[in-house]
Amino acid sequence: MRCPRRKKLAVLRGHTETIGSLVLTPDGRTLVSGGYDRTVKVWDVAAGKERASLSGHGAVIERVRIAPDGKQAASADMAGEIRVWDLTIDRARATLIKPAGRTRAMGYAADGATLVAAHHDGSGGMAVKRWEVSTGRELASFALAGQSAAILSPDGSLLARGGPADPSDPGMVEVVETASGRQRLAWSHKDPTLLVLQFSADGRTLFLLEGRTGTVRLLEVATGKVRLLVPKAVRPGRAASVPHPGGLVFALAPQGEAAAVQLLDVATGAKVCEVRRGGARVDTLAFSAGGRRPGGRGRAGPGDPGCGASTAG
């Protein structure tokens, strides 16, 4: 079934290369994107116009995050540099953070005053650090073995990482507290295609994807139990996913493909509705805090600059 009262709010064009990441402010009025063209762009969603183009990164921008109050954003590039931007004046803050390795996950803590990131440490491991945003001062740091994919909970308090198993080594999904490094969950599996997608809005559930079948598992962080299995929820391969802020549904779409974005019921796994995007390739998804405005990010191509598309439904 189709989402009721679906309306395209804007198609935003301006990046000259692939868009690496995008995120909406809590009020849904502003979208911030980071691109392979090394710029961070600030967009007025209602007007459908670029508000500012921010430069300073020397490498491809892979991640953008917005503070809970919507007044600042952080961007991380492939060289491991993190810059903080003041969205009230659309300029760079004095803060410049260099984790010394490629950033795998980044986010703000709930207070908005602390930035959390996991990055390669240069010796085959991963370092998790917390910084004071106003000064760039490091507040805490701990190391983890290995360099698997990683994600942060919405409030930055938990980090989950894990990857596919192989014949000689069972796979492991691990959840740790970013303030202390204390392990909260260690869940072993034997799936050679398992991917960690996303935390739920409340941080209590992990969304896992079986890449070979397109099956989604919802794993409880507290108990390590799979509370819901959604067979063939998406095409086999990689997928983009994001939870609705209200926690009732989550959006899911095949990554890098021209396909519809599905909204699935978190309690039952049933499809609530789907949003068709006119052939645009989906790489990442985002909701505004109110949940009425999901956004999608695609790729740029010859004669087709990358664009962020927001859809209300």
Image: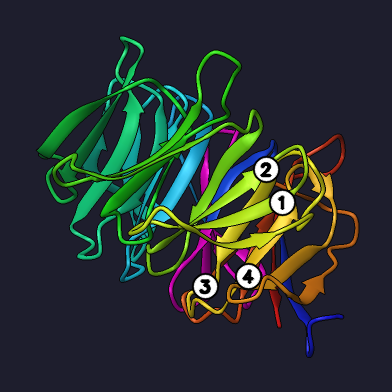
| Residue count near mark 2 (Cα–Cα under 10 Å), binned few <14, some 14–19, many ≥20 | many
Is 129 or 271 nearer to us in this picture? 271
Q: Is residue 237 left or right of residue 143?
A: right
Sooner in the amino-acid sequence: mark 3 or mark 1: 1
Sooner in the amino-acid sequence: mark 2 or mark 1: 2
Mark closer to the observer (3, 1)? 1
Alpha carbon separation for disc pair 4 and 1: 23 Å
Q: Secondary structure at mark 4?
A: strand
Alpha carbon separation for disc pair 2 and 1: 5 Å
Mark closer to the observer (3, 2)? 2
Sooner in the amino-acid sequence: mark 4 or mark 2: 2
Hey, which quadrant is residue 249 in on the image? bottom right
Q: Is residue 281 left or right of residue 290?
A: right
> What is the magenta range?
23-51
Cβ–Cβ under 8 Å for marks 2 and 1: yes
For disc 1, the marked residue is: 215
Percent across and percent down for residue 214 are 75, 48
Percent across and percent down for residue 164 are 58, 29
Sooner in the amino-acid sequence: mark 4 or mark 1: 1
For disc 2, the marked residue is: 210
Q: Secondary structure at mark 3?
A: loop
Three-letter code for the amino acid on which mark 4 is drawn: Pro
